[in-house]
């Protein structure tokens, strides 16, 4: 966090009951800003350096919470694309998580 010595994972865990949520949301938003409309678990996992098994539950929580949607039904084991679903809620949660997880510019 800017100006503080708090661990972003500790803050994310305390606020959202998930240490990875802040980082996953910020990373998904960055990917969605440069790719056409969808993001996959694999893309977020690659961007964060976390495993798919850590990112997938966060993506599913965002889907269950209405922040993500599945624009196309995917059958089988292929990539599962997600899109932003509730723009206002996404932006407000992103504002909070961006303060918690503020990565250095690439």
Image (cartoon, rainbow, N blue to C red):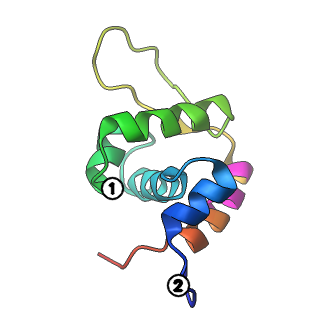
Of 68 and 48, nearer the camera is 48
Which label number is shown at residue 62? none
* Residue beneath disc 1: 48
* Residue beneath disc 2: 5
Query: Horizontally, is 44 left or right of 64 in the view?
Result: left
Examine the residues drawn in magenta and state their main secondary structure: helix
Residue 44 inside the magenta-drawn segment? no
Residue 39: in sight, yes or no? no
Give the quadrant of the C terminus.
bottom left
Say which element carries label 2.
loop
Q: Where residue 23 sits in the image (x, y, percent)?
A: 46, 58
Query: Horizontally, is 69 left or right of 75 in the view?
Result: right
Q: Where residue 52 sits in the image (x, y, percent)?
A: 32, 36
Residue found 49% across the figure and 33% down from its top: 57
- Closer to the chain start, of discs 1 and 2, is 2
Q: Is residue 106 above or below residue 34?
A: below
Of 53 and 36, nearer the camera is 53
Residue range of the region highlighted in magenta in the rendering: 89-94
Q: Where residue 15 sits in the image (x, y, percent)?
A: 68, 57
Determine crowd level at label 1: few under 14, some 14-19, many 20+ residues with C-alpha closer than 10 A.
Answer: some
Of 104 and 85, nearer the camera is 104
């Amino acid at each position: 966090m800017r100006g503080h010595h708090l661990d972003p994972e500790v803050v994310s865990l305390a606020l959202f009951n998930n240490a990875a949520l802040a980082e996953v949301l910020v990373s998904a938003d960055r990917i969605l800003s440069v790719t056409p409309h969808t993001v996959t678990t694999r893309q977020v996992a690659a961007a964060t350096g976390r495993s798919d098994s850590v990112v997938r539950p966060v993506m599913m929580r965002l889907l269950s919470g209405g922040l993500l949607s599945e624009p196309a039904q995917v059958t089988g084991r292929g990539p599962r694309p997600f899109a932003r679903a509730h723009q206002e809620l996404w932006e407000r949660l992103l504002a909070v998580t961006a303060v918690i997880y503020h990565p250095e510019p690439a």
